[in-house]
Structure formats: structure tokens, C-alpha cells
Amino acid sequence: IRGGQKSDITLQPWQAAIRVYLPRPNIYSFFCGGVLIDSCWVLSAAHCFSEGYKAENLQVTLGRTFRLQNSSSDQIFGVEDYWVHDQYDEATEDNDIMLLKLKSDNGICAVYTPEVRPVCLPEPDLVLPEWTECEISGYGKDKEFDAEYSNQVKRGHVRLWPDSQCLPEKLSNRPVTQNMICAGDTRGLDDACKGDSGGPLVCPKDGRLTLLGIVSWGDGCGKKDVPGVYTRVTRYVSWITNKMQANSN
Ligand code: 4AZ
């Protein structure tokens, strides 16, 4: 997160950190965020998985404020399987969404605590007012060209842009589809950045924080009058629930 502030996982308990096993250094290496939506289910961005990782090499950490430090509140899972949206287009980042199922022996994966709880999915027809104040979170970089991801989870404040202003000319001429939603800080400070991909954009709806977006792409991080682009989750609610149902045993 560019700008924003260091946070505590209890303020975004649906935030996941996704890692891949690297045999050579023999470590699990953080590569993207994710969002807990049910005990065994995490959403993320399709583009995070373009290298075709095997599920058996993936690990998901929940409930952790400091990316590299084990804590008594964290819950760590292997991955049973994952599904990238079959219309994901890596040239445009259209349909940049994937769903991942955590591994468990008994159908219970994440146990809900103050540090770990799922976010609400939106109704498919939810439309929030222009410039609604929302928040983003993640362990991504503080600045585009930083060498390291953030050690502490951060949160930032962004507002929903009207679609009429979310245009290629603001985004280095890359196409913007109806499956994308723009959000940015009108002060030009807070934004998602490298490593935040796959993580949440949540907005208040009837007093609950609801998942409106998944961090997808942008032109740099926190440039003035350049929004971040998020996967528009309302477009995928039936895709998500269908996949969960079809794969819940
Ligand atoms: C990235 O490279 C990335 N400012 C994600 C989000 C944004 C920029 C870059 C939005 O993963």
C-alpha cells in the first residue's frame, strides 16, 4: 500500500497472504494478497497465478499482522485446489479473479477469531454512490520501486470513481472493461501497489464492510489523478457461489 497507515489484522481480518514454495532457498515466498470469503475459500487475482503454480506448492496465511513473523493468532493452510476464471485475459486483465480452496480434513478450515473472519460478498446488483469512501489493505510495497514488500499489513483510504472518469487516457491507454472498477485517493496519496494484488477493496454497505473489488492493476502507485483498477466483484458473485457449490464435496 502506497500511503495509508500501518495497521493491525483485526481491522481487516479477511486479508490473506499467499505464498509459493521455493525449493532452492527452501522457503515459502510471499507473492500476492487474498480475501477470505468463507471458512475454506479465498479470492485472489488471476494474474497472480499466471506462472501456473501447483496447488500443492501454495500456502495461505490468515490472521497475521507482520508478514514474516509467526504469531499466536495466525492460521496457515495448504491449498486443495484453485480455479482461475476461464475468461481471464492476461493482455487486458479482464476477469482478473480466481478462487482458492483451503485444505482441511474435516470441512472446517479457518476458525473465526478477532484476527480471522470472512468479508461479506455484495449482492450482484449493488451500486454504491460515486466517491464512496472505501478501504484497501495488503502487505504490498510502500512505493512502486521499493525492493521489499511491507513487513506490516497496511490499510489505505480510497474513493470509488465514477465509471465515466475511469478511462484509458488516465491509465496509460490500457482498456478498462465493465468488469473493472476504479478507486483512488482524491488527495493523491493512498493506493494499492505491487504485492497488494489479489487483496480487498471493501466499502461500507448497511454498516458492514462489503467486498467491492480485488486489487488488479494500475499505472504505478499513488500517482496524482491516477486511480487503481480493481476487479468488479459484483460481476462475479454467481461465478463464485457456483464454483464453491460445485467443489464443496
Ligand atoms: C501490481 O503491480 C500493482 N496502483 C497493483 C495495483 C496497482 C499497481 C500495481 C494500483 O501488482
Image (tube, rainbow, N blue to C red):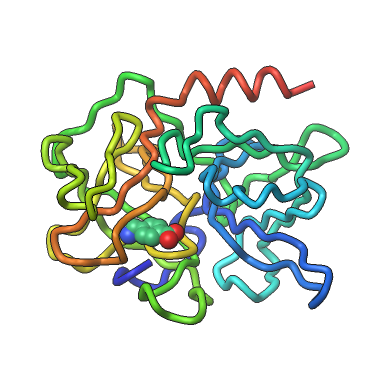
Which x, y percent locates residue 128? 22, 32
Q: Judge from the rendering whether residue 30 lies leftward or rightward of residue 210; answer left or right.
A: right
Front-most of 73 and 107?
A: 107
Q: Judge from the rendering whether residue 192 lies leftward or rightward of residue 162; answer left or right.
A: right
Q: Quadrant of the N terminus?
A: bottom left
Which x, y percent locates residue 56? 82, 49
Quadrant in which residue 91 is drawn = top left
Which x, y percent locates residue 8? 47, 66
Quadrant in which residue 245 is drawn = top right
Residue 246 in view, yes or no? yes
Q: Quadrant of the C terminus?
A: top right
Residue in view at x 50 percent, y 38 percent: 97
Residue 137 in view, yes or no? no
Extreme residue toward the bottom, this view? 147
Residue in view at x 57 percent, y 56 percent: 115
Q: How many marks?
A: 0
Query: Is 82 drawn above or below residue 145 in the view shown?
Result: above
Front-most of 227 and 207?
A: 227
Ligand 1's image quarter is: bottom left
Front-most of 134 and 85?
A: 85
Which x, y percent locates residue 41? 64, 37
Residue in view at x 83 percent, y 69 percent: 23
